[in-house]
Image: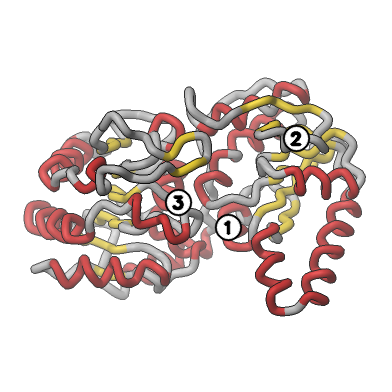
């Protein structure tokens, strides 16, 4: 049995971008064992994936939080992580971390073949490396698939994959039924945040809350739709700003669901309207239709994948200074978020209408 471990400590979207890699490995090596080393926050994205045999949910960021509370507990968790990876006897690591510390741990855990990106000469502990300056000329998924070449695997279907358990689906339908939503209703999701990965800079990716509110009112009025606001606890203030600006009453679930429940609720939507962030890629992986707003980030690199104009509509204002997130660095905004602030509600409404007209 060949044993592979995927290393990706990033957020929801980045983890989903690796799912075509996992599928390609399983197609090429049907009897292989695949482990996944991720951060604790995103493990529910992976736990129902039948192609993943074991999850190691402890990133460097998670360890820093533990160390902050207890140095000894941090040491125990760190050594436990190394031992649990070593115990599995992995042959090959595919390291998407861009951080030499992960490949170093893979080395001391006895993994002989370590494949990854040599970004800023951080690939010193890799045995096979691809030099990059960043992601710019193609989608991140396609960069990720490039790491299969050194291990002799040819990529196949590059669609993202996300699996929803029957238990999670029942929970989601139960949550929606409490608000008298049934399968006959037109259900539109609103995800007005931008995920945890950008931290204090997440607001730079936010389409204005008042515009989300106006758009939601128009959708409810014109289509008699049920609008559901989604997000985590940190996005409660945005959700409250939306609901206060509205004439109609949406269903506000921001901060009220687990990640597993959020995934299953998105799976029950007709359309998700969202900023650039994890929920967008969850919807894409579930083959849901999306309207998304992009500002500092290039949708060619981080947009819904694979792009299909009948399923995904990306709205953005292209300026000379955009995108300003380039090669993993965010440049200073010199135009006060004009690229995303000036996207009008009419454009968003037209996008929704177009997707509904093509409703399956």
Residue holding disc 3: 278
Residue 101 percent coordinates (x, y): 76, 48
Instruction: Give the numbered dot on residue 42.
Output: 1
Q: CA distance from mark 3 to mark 2?
A: 27 Å
Q: Specify which label sits upstream in the sequence, 1 or 3.
A: 1
Mark whose residue sits in front, 3 or 2: 2
- The colour scheme used to paint the residues is secondary structure
Quarter of the picture containing the C terminus is top left
Residue 296 versus residue 225 in the image, above or below: above
Mark whose residue sits in front, 2 or 1: 2
Q: Specify which label sits upstream in the sequence, 2 or 1.
A: 1
Residue 280 percent coordinates (x, y): 39, 47
Q: Specify which label sits upstream in the sequence, 3 or 2.
A: 2
56 to the left or right of 267: right
Residue 54 percent coordinates (x, y): 75, 53
Instruction: Give the numbered dot on residue 340.
Output: none
Residue holding disc 2: 123
Asked if the residue at tag 3 contacts the one at tag 1, i.e. Cβ–Cβ closer than 8 Å, the answer is no
Asked whether residue 264 appears in the rendered view, the answer is no
98 to the left or right of 137: right
Q: Regarding mark 2 in the picture, which secondary structure is present there? A: loop
Specify the quadrant of the image occupied by residue 45. Answer: bottom right
Q: Rate crowding at label 3 as few (under 14), some (14 to 19) or many (20 or more) other CA atoms within 10 Å.
A: many
Asked whether residue 358 appears in the rendered view, the answer is yes
Q: CA distance from mark 2 to mark 1?
A: 25 Å
Q: Rate crowding at label 2 as few (under 14), some (14 to 19) or many (20 or more) other CA atoms within 10 Å.
A: many
**For the view shown, which residue lies furthest in the bottom direction?**
69
Quarter of the picture containing the N terminus is top right
């Amino acid at each position: 049995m060949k044993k592979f471990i995927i290393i990706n400590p990033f957020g929801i979207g980045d983890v989903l971008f690796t799912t075509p890699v996992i599928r390609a490995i399983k197609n090429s090596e049907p009897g292989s064992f695949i482990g996944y080393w991720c951060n604790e926050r995103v493990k529910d994205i992976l736990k129902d994936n039948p192609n993943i045999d074991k999850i190691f949910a402890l990133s460097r960021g998670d360890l820093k939080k533990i160390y902050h509370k207890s140095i000894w507990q941090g040491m125990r968790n760190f050594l436990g992580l190394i031992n649990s990876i070593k115990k599995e006897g992995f042959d090959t690591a595919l390291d998407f971390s861009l951080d030499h510390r992960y490949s170093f741990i893979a080395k001391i855990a006895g993994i002989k073949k370590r494949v990854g990106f040599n970004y800023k000469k951080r690939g010193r502990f890799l045995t096979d490396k691809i030099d990059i300056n960043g992601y710019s000329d193609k989608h991140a998924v396609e960069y990720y698939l490039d790491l299969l070449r050194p291990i002799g695997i040819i990529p196949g279907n590059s669609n993202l994959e996300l699996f929803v358990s029957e238990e999670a689906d029942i929970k989601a339908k139960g949550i929606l039924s409490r608000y008298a939503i049934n399968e006959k209703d037109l259900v539109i999701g609103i995800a007005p945040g931008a995920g945890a990965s950008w931290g204090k800079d997440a607001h730079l990716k936010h389409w204005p809350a008042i515009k989300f509110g106006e758009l939601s009112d128009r959708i409810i009025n014109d289509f008699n739709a049920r609008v559901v606001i989604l997000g985590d606890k940190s996005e409660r203030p945005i959700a409250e700003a939306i609901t206060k600006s509205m004439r109609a009453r949406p269903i506000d679930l921001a901060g009220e669901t687990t990640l597993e429940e959020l995934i299953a609720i998105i799976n029950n939507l007709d359309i998700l309207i969202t900023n650039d962030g994890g929920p967008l890629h969850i919807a894409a992986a579930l083959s849901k239709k999306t309207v998304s707003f992009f500002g500092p980030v290039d949708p060619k690199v981080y947009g819904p994948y694979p792009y299909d104009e009948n399923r995904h509509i990306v709205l953005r204002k292209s300026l000379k200074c955009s995108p300003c997130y380039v090669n993993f660095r965010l440049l200073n905004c010199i135009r006060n978020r004009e690229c995303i602030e000036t996207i009008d509600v009419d454009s968003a409404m037209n996008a929704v209408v177009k997707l509904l007209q093509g409703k399956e």
